[in-house]
Amino acid sequence: MVQFSGKEIGELRRKIGELNVKEAKKYFEEALNEKVRSISLARGKLFYEDQFLEMVYLRLETDDNNEYCFEIYDESAYTSSNTDAMTFYGKIVSIAKYFLGKIELPKNRLIGFS
């Protein structure tokens, strides 16, 4: 999970949600500094605790067979990948900086495995 705060709230979902698939592929290749082999992009809603939340779903596969999956909401994002935790953390930071500019990183990292 990635938690957004302050002016980050809603921005990543809005910016990625405005892209078409070709634009998203181009921007994510730049953000990840990798060639994207396949991309899925969808917009919709999640029904959670009796309320609807706007969301963007994004799945990427790079030429080196790395996979990244994001469910992006206004206040948070659910993320998963087949890479190691530190690589994935670096990619998440790169994506956030690419789309949001300056970001505030937490002082410590909590990495969960499931």
Image: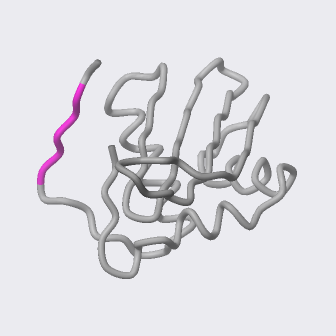
In this view, which residue lies farthest toward the front? 50
Q: Position of residue 3 (x, y in %)?
A: 31, 57
Residue at x 65% of width, y 18% of height: 65
Quadrant location of the C terminus? top left
Q: Position of residue 23 (x, y in %)?
A: 82, 58
Residue at x 17% of width, y 45% of height: 109
Residue 112 occupies quadrant:
top left
Q: As rendered, which of 104 and 8 lies closer to the eye?
A: 8
Picture layout, residue 46 above or below residue 80: below
Classified by dominant secondary structure, the portion drawn in magenta counts as loop
Residue at x 59% of width, y 52% of height: 45
Total of numbered circles in the picture?
0
Q: Position of residue 30 (x, y in %)?
A: 68, 54
Residue 69 occupies quadrant:
top right
Q: As rendered, which of 92 and 46 lies closer to the eye?
A: 46
Residue 87 as seen in the image, left or right of residue 53: left
Q: Is residue 110 magenta?
A: yes
Q: Which residues are magenta?
A: 108-112
Q: How is the image coloured?
A: one colour
Residue 25 as seen in the image, left or right of residue 5: right
Quadrant location of the N terminus? top left
Picture layout, residue 50 above or below residue 5: above
Q: Position of residue 111 (x, y in %)?
A: 22, 34
Picture layout, residue 103 above or below residue 82: below
Residue 26 as seen in the image, left or right of residue 69: right
Q: Is residue 111 magenta?
A: yes
In this view, which residue lies farthest toward the right? 22
In this view, which residue lies farthest toward the left? 108
Residue at x 26% of width, y 22% of height: 113
Picture layout, residue 103 above or below residue 63: below
